[in-house]
Amino acid sequence: MADETTQGTGTVATKPQRRFKRKLVGHVTSDKMDKTVVVEVVRYSRHPMYKKYVRTRAHYKAHDEQNTCKTGDRVEIEESRPMSREKCWKVVRIVKRAVID
């Protein structure tokens, strides 16, 4: 019972549980901002009527502390606290580097 505390009234109060942080994988589309990258995440969902798989894209601004991500890299991003008006994701790791020809 490490996460439970007893109050003076005899009731047991529990600490609030940490929320699960979502993780997404996508490609970096822009790295022109300082310590920020734009990541495009592609999802495939099946259309309910036509039974065809439809591609949906979403763009997220993610925090890149060391400015290591470049355009074309495949990265994993994780939900975090809001850092600005549009930026509430951070780069966890670079899955695959972009091939530069």
Image (tube, grey):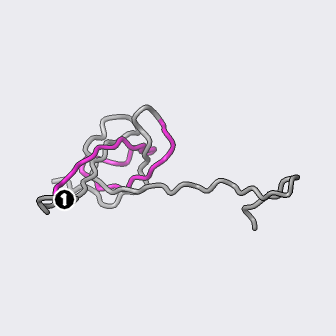
Q: What quarter of the picture does the C terminus occupy? A: bottom left
Residue shown at 27% from the left, 48% from the top: 40
Residue 21, given in percent of the width and then of the height, sits at 48, 55
> What SS does tag 1 mark?
loop
Q: Is residue 56 magenta?
A: yes
As rendered, which of 38 and 51 lies closer to the eye? 51
Residue 75, given in percent of the width and then of the height, sits at 34, 55
Q: Amino acid at mark 1?
A: Pro
Residue 97, given in percent of the width and then of the height, sits at 28, 57
Q: Name above or below for residue 3 compared with residue 8.
A: below
Q: Which residues are magenta?
A: 54-83
**In the drawing, does residue 31 fall left or right of residue 50?**
right
Residue 34, given in percent of the width and then of the height, sits at 39, 35
Quarter occupied by residue 59: top left
Q: What quarter of the picture does the N terminus occupy? A: bottom right
As rendered, which of 71 and 55 lies closer to the eye? 55
Q: Name above or below for residue 41 compared with residue 37.
A: below
Residue annotated with mark 1: 48
Q: Is residue 65 magenta?
A: yes
